Image (cartoon, rainbow, N blue to C red):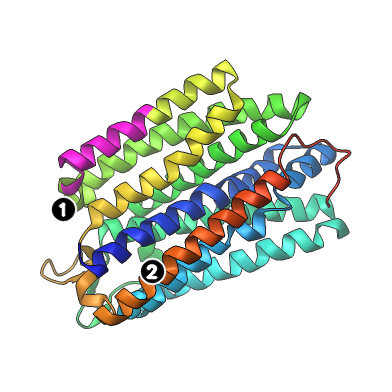
Amino acid sequence: MDYATAWFYFSAFLLGMYLAFDGFDLGMGTLLAFIRDQKDRDVLLNTIAPVWDGNEVWFITWGAGLFAMWPALYATLFSTFYLGVWLLAFLFIFRAVGFEFRNRNKALWDKLFALVSALIPLVIGVIVGNLVMGIPLDANGFHGSLLTLFRPYPLIVGLFVLFAVTWHGANWAVYRTTGKIQEQMKKHAFNFWVLTVVFLLLTVVGMKVWAPSRFERALTPLGLGLTLIILAAGLLDGYLIKKGSEKLSFYISWLAFPLVVYLVYYTMYPYWVISTTDPDFKLSIHDLAASPLTLQAVLGVSVVLAVIIMAYTLYVYRMFGGKVTEAEGYY
């Protein structure tokens, strides 16, 4: 395996970890829109208050890796998804502001926080959907606008990511709460699990229609194996939600994210970018990569950094583990 390929799949690991950890933060934030009782919303936010900002380190590391290892890709993405990337940056900033300002008007800021928490995974999914489907790009640049990015297939992928993180967030809430709020979250977990499974199937079918070259990779033995494992895990989680196995349900939804991200990366290999207007215009991971020396030198350091981040993350989760009640206030 060459260093560009190693970095490609290491990038998949970083993004998978981000969605696995920060995904339930975003999903639970989205669920605030369904909770009327202010005390219940406080309890839900208390479950993520000590860890949400640390979870975003995975995303920062993933973005830094793209910049360092594929500078040409970084430039391509920013020129193509310029408004989308800025929208995503604004949403992340506004999300942090929401945590700090909610005590001034909890009813208002909780609604805004729920909206931002829903838009972040939607936009991430739309960007990923465009990379999978291909974009109207050639040697002369991008031919489109912000609305071009919100085509049917990227929207399907965006909704899949949104519903998946909301299902994951509900599983986290069930795992960390008790009583009435836990019962509410069990219902939301099952409902969003159904939506996640439906949109996963739509994403796979849509790949065959809108991204046939990517779909061919999914039909290889490894691609089919990963797809079956993901579907089996999803179906098992639906059973566990109904059974009330709160801890195992959360762990399965957590594991689903790195598996899905790895499958998406696998279907995209070796092309980061394919064009919908010029079939011959493709940008591979090797075309866009930094020098071999850079790839080699930074890989080992980045792996060690990822181990440190994981160790710190697990320590924090253990430190702030256990059930959360309204008496254990953070905000």
Which of 302 and 243 lies nearest the eye of the viewer?
302
Q: Residue farthest to the left?
A: 280
Q: Quadrant of residue 290?
A: bottom left
Magenta stretch encompasses residue 222: yes
| Amino acid type, label 2 | Gly
First in sequence, mark 1 or 2: give its number: 1
Q: In which quarter of the image is residue 268?
A: bottom left
Q: Is 91 on the left or on the right of 45, as rendered?
A: left
Between circles 1 and 2, the one closer to the viewer is 2
Q: Image point 14% across, 70% down: which residue?
A: 278
Give the prevailing secondary structure in the magenta stretch.
helix
Q: Image point 69% across, 54% down: which residue?
A: 113
Position of 18 relative to 69 (above/below): above
Q: In which quarter of the image is residue 297?
A: bottom left
Q: What stretch is highlighted in magenta?
A: 217-232
Q: Is residue 48 visible?
A: yes
Q: What element carries label 2?
A: helix
Residue on which disc 2 sits:
300
Residue on which disc 1 sits:
213
